Amino acid sequence: MGQFLNPREAMIHHLEGAADYEEEHYPLDENEEAVFKKALAAEKNRPTLDEFDSPNLEKDKIWLAEQRKKRRQEKTKRSRILEYAIIDQIERSNWLGENGMTYETTEYDDRRNHTDLVFVLEKNGKIYYLAIDVTSSENDQKLWEKEATIKKEIESGQLTHIKYFKDKNQKMELKNIPRVILALDRAGIQRLCGDLVKKKPIELAKSPEQILILEQIRDSMSDQIEYALNLLLSEISHVLRYLDKEDKEELITVLKEARHLAQKPENLPHVLGTLEDQKKLLSKLRGFPLITRYLNVISRQKAIYGIAQNLIEKKSGEISQPAAETREQNIVLRHTRSNLQQFHLPPQVDRLAEAA
């Protein structure tokens, strides 16, 4: 599914673009066409740069115009359908919780910051933001490219930036927010469109697709946290000489838990909890800027992980679960679960744990 069948197919994909190839060879069915019309109408409400005031606004408008000339619109109709469906069902059917809302980004932030939607949740007096990159692509390479961009953000310690964000009450700039990729394949989008056309709102509120979306968010956060955790431990390995005996004992406590993450990725919350319990070690580590960077990244990612996991647990007793086959075929879940099984400690701290 993720690979081209022959050189000609690859050539066609790159010359015509993903959207052209998809729509020529796999046209929308009747239900998809009906939902696509609604998506087109909804896109008229998408915020534009003209609604904002920024010192660099004219410069950003010029950049956007140049990008339009360089690249045709890469979104497939199915990606646009999926964006619309997610926004619509989060608002109408509480797919991501009763207090959750999702807002479409400007075309500028879509192209520049790889974000189609921003999910916003208010919980316990705090507001949490999640950038969402929506795709209907069944091409593994496209997903790898998107994942690589997210990993670069994690490495820099600067997560996704939304320069022009607008919700119901305000316009603002968002910095350092986690980002996930959400995907449904062609069959999944066709199934979703059939539900949107034929089912009543009360039935849509119990759609198993929302569990699939929540699992993608949770597993993507797990994967990103593990990546950030590996970077964190690599930085710690460079400052071992500054840690005293008690610091190292606390570190070893964390390392012993983390060593088994490849076999038991579900233990990640326990590993993070163990890390948080090592107060003396953390106090020492926060004296190193690079280490503080990754601790802050993990903290933001962990919050989103917790929100997704809590919603899955809450909804699991009320909503039928997606079939195992559907989970296995989902391109995001397939990638993230493979990544989670490859976690390893950096060699220097691994030796420390092994010697203890």
Image (cartoon, helix red, strand yellow):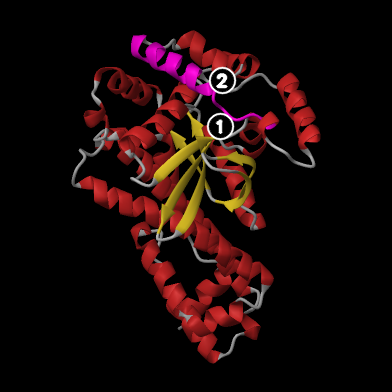
Q: What is the three-letter code of the residue carrying label 2?
A: Ala
Q: Residue furthest bottom?
A: 245
Q: Which residues are magenta?
A: 30-49
Q: What is the three-letter code of the residue carrying label 1?
A: Lys
Q: Residue at x 70, y 29 (%)?
A: 50
- For mark 2, what is the residue? 18
Residues 90 and 181: in front is 90
Magenta: predominant secondary structure element?
helix
Check whether the beta carbons of the residues at disc 1 and disc 2 lie within 8 A of each other.
yes
Residues 174 and 148: in front is 174
Instruction: In the rendered view, tell whether residue 148 sits above or below residue 105.
Output: below
Instruction: In the rendered view, tell whether residue 103 sits above or below residue 124.
Output: above
- Residue 234: give x, y in percent of width and height: 60, 67
Q: How many marks on residues? A: 2
Q: Secondary structure at mark 1?
A: helix
Q: Residue furthest front?
A: 169
- Mark 2 crowdedness (10 Å alpha carbons): few <14, some 14-19, many ≥20: some
Residue 41, visible in the rendered structure? yes
Residue 343 in magenta stretch: no
Q: Residue at x 37, y 10 (%)?
A: 29
- For mark 1, what is the residue? 142
- Residue 169: give x, y in percent of width and height: 54, 42
- Residue 247: give x, y in percent of width and height: 53, 85
Quadrant containing the C terminus is bottom left
